[in-house]
Amino acid sequence: MRRIVSNLLVCGLVAALSFSLAACSKQESASAGYASREVADKAMAGGAMPAAAPAAPAEAQMAAASDAAANGIAEDAAARREADDGVETATTVDAGQLSSSAATYKDGTRKFIRTAQAQFRVKDVYDSALAIEDVAAQQGGFVVDNNLSAQTLSSQRRPAGDGKLIELTEYQVRGSLTVRVPSDHTQDFLRAIAKQMEFLDQRAFQAADAQFDLLRRQLAWQREQDAQRELGDAIRGGDRLDRKADVIQARSGARQQRDEALIEQKQYEDRVDFSTITLSLYQLPKIRQTEMTDTEAVFRDHAPGFFPRMFEAIRAGWYAVLDVVVAVTAAWPLWLAIALAVYAVRRWRALRPQRRPPPIGE
């Protein structure tokens, strides 16, 4: 049995050795062929170099084209690997994700009130907020609200020695901006700020048809104008003094309503001309390390020793006893009343006649 097992082992070792030798020979032949091809290419290039000197620009263009093709192939390969793995590694947002016909649709007869909202992650909230303000100014818009805040998520303290503490704080910075840009530049603005985004959580577009609301406000303003004119004609027509006073008061109210109608119309037109974009941005949590004084350790190091504390305790106890004595003395009217009551009871018992029991024989 042992001889059979040993024979099998020897046969396995011989087979493995033969396979490894065959693989090495194939690899050496492949490398030799590749080296021979490389030498031949170099020889051909060296022999043709003097004659091809005038065609150097063409060769440079061919080299550039080959490099671009190689880069494109590498990018396609990376995209295929990403698609195969199912893991997204990009840290930028495509500008196409911030596009919508609601931000670009135009109609010669309709007016739209455009609004947009977006929530996204950035690398640094403060830098991105400043960059967004710059883009808004470049697009002819302005910022109406800019609110940034840092939220503490957790905090831990560890002693560092020498009366110092190391505080580690996890915090996250969030911000919200409200930007108004010309309606025609809404999509351009959103595409321009896409480079600030690392991840887009959500976005929304609205385009409300405002033509009928604008017409309603224009008609209301015209009615107030007509009422104002009619009241003016009534005053000029002449009438009794009391009626003129009522007309003047009514005219004042009509002027106020006319002004309010005009303001509402202008506000609505402004909402049509400038879109309102609300942005919510945040960044990944960060850790801040702060070195600070350990106040508890300082107080502990400067605390008095055992014997001074014991003497201080004795002194405090003695003063406590004295305080009790003073408090008892302060209640002397009570003690006096108790003493008088006891004396009166004893006196009354002494003066009361005592009954003697009758003799037993009687």
Image: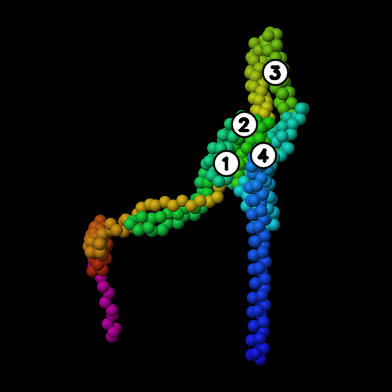
Which residue position holds label 3? 225
Q: Quadrant of residue 207?
A: top right
Q: Amino acid at mark 2?
A: Gln
Which residue position holds label 2? 139
Which residue position holds label 4? 55
Q: Are marks 1 and 4 in contact (CB under 8 Å)?
A: no
278 relative to 304, above or below: above
Quadrant the C terminus occupies: bottom left
Tag 2, which secondary structure?
loop
What are the residue bounds of the magenta stretch? 351-362
Estimate the spatial distance between the alpha carbons at disc 1 and disc 4, rounded to whole Å: 59 Å
User: Between tags 2 and 3, which lies in front?
Assistant: 2
Tag 4, which secondary structure?
helix
53 relative to 36, above or below: above
Q: Are marks 1 and 2 in contact (CB under 8 Å)?
A: no
Q: Residue at x 66, y 53 (%)?
A: 40
User: Between tags 2 and 4, which lies in front?
Assistant: 4
Q: Amino acid at mark 3?
A: Gln
Estimate the spatial distance between the alpha carbons at disc 3 and disc 4, rounded to whole Å: 82 Å
Which of 311/92 is in front? 92
Q: Residues within 10 Å of mark 3 (few under 14, many from 20)?
A: some
- The x and y percentages for residue 197 are 60, 44
Q: Amino acid at mark 1?
A: Ser
- The x and y percentages for residue 47 are 65, 47
Which of 353/321 is in front? 321
Which residue position holds label 1? 176
Tag 3, which secondary structure?
helix
Quadrant the N terminus occupies: bottom right
